[in-house]
Image (spheres, coloured by chain):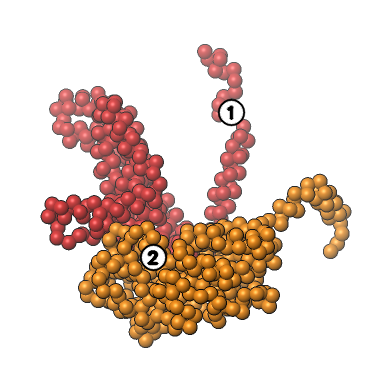
Chain colours: A orange, B red
């Protein structure tokens, strides 16, 4: 680097400014920021993860709840000085974030808890902090015999009672893949899935624009059965809405929710510590209790309560009952699927 | 008096420099993002590597985007017409009511503006649902056997949008009607014109500026009403705002999202010009 007079002057000014205002250098070393998801996730992380991290490190962590896509947009817009240190992602956005080189590998070797994660949750680019589980949800006041299979949605007695979502969400896309699989397809081939949705049309009362809208539709009696997220249903149940969740016999769809260190984060070491705390059996065990009911990824956590009753009693059963989808393959084709869904499912 | 007026500098003579903060604000927060949007729309692929007209070619040839665009504009037109019908009647009532009733009416007109659009839209979910107010009333009277499907239908969406945007239509209409000299209408009927003829020949032309202003506001607000469109229309109806969101957020296809946003913008501006032109033409004709 050529040392010009202007450069020297600039450096001198900066140095003296740092002397005069020590606050500047501290302002740059900001608090650790964790971009969690909005709603009940933020509550759960505020109640359990933040205190546990404070106890382990004596440091504070700032929760900034936002959707995965917004996290990616914010970090991508300020790659060199990201406003977030730790990101939380569904499988699709996680691959996008890694693909756009926004993620720092997690220091596996120095982690206490990483090795205890079940193998599906282990990934150095972002270990899974919890699983989101999608199964069938139904209104037990209207549907007396609990459904057992995805195929039940096509039963003629549910004419005009079924709700689904479009493919904008992880849930909607995952559901399409699973019904394709039921008819011999899978991540690589959803032809049969589209055919099945076409056959579902007489039963459809609603194609919601997002999974959140399904909740309102149960409350209004607009739909009585739909694919649904285990945790979203617990919130509805807690508010007294008559809904139940069952894992279909084909297996419940499990989405890995992965936690990542943001590339160029000024708080890398703390970020790694936060992730390690998030993977610990203590934190995951607490998050598994009511009212949070977050599905743990650490094999040392003993399943209890609603999760043990409805989902799986232990890790072995979890592996048998959960279906993990190949989101790498899904992402390759998702644009084309959304395009097709737009055209074919239109009213 | 003239001397006093001439003493100070004329109002229009102030330096334009006073407008620089506002201009800077617009350049920074409106012009710059718009330019950025235009640049992004000329990337050939979502990976933002090479430039080309690919996105615009896709819009013109995919046989899907343009129908969605026209359908969105059509939705806006339908909503605007319903709004005009309801809004004109409401504004008419307001202007002809005694003072105390006017206060109540104004409160009713403004109420929707004071409530968040999300809350208003959720209220319509409750009204239109299977066990909603409309269906339970109809069932109570024995007029229907099974609940009608109102939510997630186009009719339901138009009614909802019309309600949500009604204040935007009514307020300019009230202003226009209040400016109208009642003597003109009296004169018209004294000269033997029927009520209808008076309305068509006198009232309507004279309130046209209010109608155009109200229609513009309602139209622009209803075609871009992302929340109402997705909550009441559902995932089976696709309009431009949801389409843009889907491409930008779920698919991270920024170039295509930028391109369809710009096409949408141009189409809306074209519609607005047509509205204005119609207003001017009919004013000239009357």
Give the vertical position of A109 relative to A267 (above or below).
Answer: below
In the rendered image, the residue lying farthest to the bottom is A184
Labels 2, 1: front one: 2
Name the residue nearer the viewer: B93 or A71. A71
* Residue underneath mark 2: A233
* Spot occupied by residue B194 in the image (x, y as percentages of width and height): 15, 32
Residue B16 in view of the camera: yes
Q: Are marks 2 and 1 in contact (CB under 8 Å)?
A: no
**Residue that mark 1 sits on:** B13
Q: What separation in Å lies between label 2 and label 1 (alpha carbons)? A: 66 Å
Q: Could you tell whether B26 is left or right of B57 in the image?
A: right
Q: Helix, strand, or loop for circle 2? A: helix
**On what subunit does the disc labeled 1 rest?**
B
Q: Residues within 10 Å of mark 1 (few under 14, many from 20)?
A: few
Determine which quarter of the picture holds residue B90.
top left
- Using the image as rendered, state which of residue A304 and residue B38 is in the foreground: A304
Instruction: Tell me which residue sits at (62%, 32%) in the image.
Output: B15
Residue A80, given in percent of the width and then of the height, sits at 68, 62
Numbered disc 2: what chain?
Answer: A
Horizontal and vertical percent position of residue A17: 80, 48
């Amino acid at each position: 680097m050529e040392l010009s007079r202007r450069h020297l002057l600039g450096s001198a000014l900066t140095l003296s400014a740092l002397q005069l205002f020590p606050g500047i250098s501290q302002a740059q070393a900001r608090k650790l920021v964790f971009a969690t998801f909005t709603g009940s996730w933020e509550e759960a992380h505020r109640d359990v993860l933040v205190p546990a991290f404070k106890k382990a490190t004596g440091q504070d962590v700032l929760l900034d709840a936002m959707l995965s896509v917004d996290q990616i947009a914010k970090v991508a817009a300020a790659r060199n000085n990201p406003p977030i240190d730790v990101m939380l992602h569904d499988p699709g956005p996680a691959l996008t974030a890694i693909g756009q080189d926004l993620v720092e590998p997690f220091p596996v070797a120095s982690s206490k808890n990483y090795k205890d994660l079940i193998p599906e949750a282990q990934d150095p680019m972002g270990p899974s902090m919890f699983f989101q589980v999608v199964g069938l949800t139904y209104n037990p006041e209207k549907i007396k015999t609990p459904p057992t299979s995805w195929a039940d949605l096509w039963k003629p007695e549910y004419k005009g009672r079924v709700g689904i979502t479009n493919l904008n969400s992880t849930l909607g896309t995952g559901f399409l893949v699973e019904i394709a699989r039921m008819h011999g397809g899978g991540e690589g081939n959803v032809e049969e899935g589209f055919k099945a949705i076409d056959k579902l049309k007489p039963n459809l009362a609603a194609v919601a624009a997002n999974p959140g809208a399904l909740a309102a539709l149960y409350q209004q009696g607009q739909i009585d059965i739909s694919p649904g997220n285990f945790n979203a249903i617990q919130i509805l149940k807690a508010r007294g809405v008559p809904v139940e969740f069952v894992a279909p016999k084909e297996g419940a769809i499990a989405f890995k929710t992965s936690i990542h260190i943001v590339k160029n984060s000024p708080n890398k070491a703390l970020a790694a510590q936060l992730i390690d705390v998030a993977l610990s059996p203590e934190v995951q065990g607490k998050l598994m209790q009511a009212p949070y009911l977050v599905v743990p990824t650490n094999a040392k956590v003993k399943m209890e309560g609603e999760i043990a009753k409805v989902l799986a009693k232990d890790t072995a059963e979890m592996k048998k009952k959960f279906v993990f989808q190949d989101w790498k393959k899904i992402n390759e084709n998702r644009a084309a699927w959304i395009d097709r869904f737009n055209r074919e499912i239109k009213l | 008096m003239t001397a006093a007026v001439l003493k100070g500098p004329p109002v229009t003579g102030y330096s334009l420099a006073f407008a620089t903060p506002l201009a800077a604000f617009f350049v920074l927060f409106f012009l710059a993002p718009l330019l950025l949007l235009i640049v992004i729309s000329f990337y050939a692929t979502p990976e933002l590597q090479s430039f080309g007209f690919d996105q615009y070619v896709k819009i013109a040839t995919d046989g899907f985007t343009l129908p969605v665009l026209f359908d969105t504009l059509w939705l806006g037109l339908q909503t605007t017409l319903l709004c005009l019908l309801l809004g004109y009647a409401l504004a008419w009532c307001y202007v002809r009511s005694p003072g105390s009733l006017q206060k109540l009416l104004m409160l009713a007109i403004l109420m929707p503006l004071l409530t968040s659009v999300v809350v208003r839209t959720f209220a319509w979910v409750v009204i239109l649902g299977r066990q909603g107010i409309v269906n339970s009333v109809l069932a109570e009277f024995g007029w229907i056997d099974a609940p009608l499907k109102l939510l997630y239908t186009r009719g339901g969406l138009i009614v909802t949008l019309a309600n949500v945007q009604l204040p935007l239509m009514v307020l300019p209409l009230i202003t226009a009607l209040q400016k109208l000299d009642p003597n003109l209408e009296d004169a018209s009927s004294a000269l033997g014109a029927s009520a209808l003829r008076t309305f068509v020949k006198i009232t309507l032309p004279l309130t046209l500026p209010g109608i155009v202003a109200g229609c513009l506001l309602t139209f622009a607000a209803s075609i871009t009403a992302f929340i109402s469109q997705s909550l009441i229309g559902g995932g089976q109806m696709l309009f431009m705002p949801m389409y843009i969101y889907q491409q930008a957020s779920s698919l991270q296809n920024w170039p295509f999202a930028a391109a369809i946003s710009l096409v949408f913008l141009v189409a809306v501006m074209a519609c607005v010009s047509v509205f204005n032109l119609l207003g001017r033409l009919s004013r000239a004709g009357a």
